[in-house]
Image: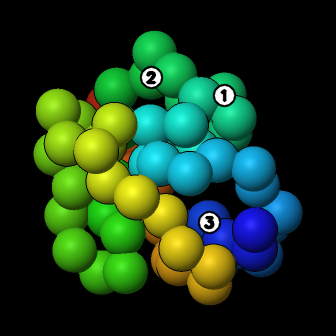
């Protein structure tokens, strides 16, 4: 299925947001996620189903000042 991740179109076999993060090597990373512009809490990712053309945003915290 084609999904857009941080602006790039990718082909993923994932059916949930959690599976997509694992496929993208974010399994244990501390990140914030949004699906189609709506924040998705970490605890809800395994239950968040993906559909063709969905847009995922993945944001990692940065240190600095």
Residue carrying label 2: 29
Taking the spot 22% from the left edge, 74% from the top edge, the residue there is: 38
Q: Mark 2 vs mark 3: which is more N-terminal? A: 3
Dots 2 and 1: beta carbons under 8 Å? Answer: yes
Q: Position of residue 46 (x, y in %)?
A: 34, 37
User: Which element type, helix, strand or loop, lies under badge 3?
Assistant: strand
Question: Depth check: 10 or 48 in front?
Answer: 48
Taking the spot 19% from the left edge, 42% from the top edge, the residue there is: 44
Taking the spot 55% from the left edge, 37% from the top edge, the residue there is: 19
Q: Quadrant of the C terminus?
A: top left
- Label 3 and label 1: CA atoms lie apart by 13 Å
Q: Position of residue 5 (x, y in %)?
A: 62, 66
Q: Position of residue 41 (x, y in %)?
A: 16, 45
Q: Position of residue 35 (x, y in %)?
A: 36, 69
Q: How is the image coloured?
A: rainbow
- Label 2 and label 3: CA atoms lie apart by 16 Å
- Label 2 and label 1: CA atoms lie apart by 8 Å
Question: Depth check: 49 or 54 in front?
Answer: 49
Q: Is residue 51 above or below residue 13?
A: below
Left or right placement of residue 24 versus residue 22 in this view: right
Residue carrying label 3: 5
Question: Is residue 37 in sight in this rendering?
Answer: yes
User: Which element type, helix, strand or loop, lies under badge 2?
Assistant: loop
User: Which element type, helix, strand or loop, lies under badge 1?
Assistant: loop
Residue carrying label 1: 25
Taking the spot 32% from the left edge, 64% from the top edge, the residue there is: 34
Residue pushed farthest right?
11
């Amino acid at each position: 299925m084609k999904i857009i991740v941080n602006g790039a179109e990718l082909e993923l076999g994932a059916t949930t947001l959690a599976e997509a993060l694992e496929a993208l090597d974010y399994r244990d990373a501390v990140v914030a996620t949004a699906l189609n512009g709506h924040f998705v809490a970490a605890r809800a990712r395994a239950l968040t189903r993906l559909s063709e053309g969905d847009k995922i945003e993945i944001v990692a915290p940065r240190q600095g000042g």
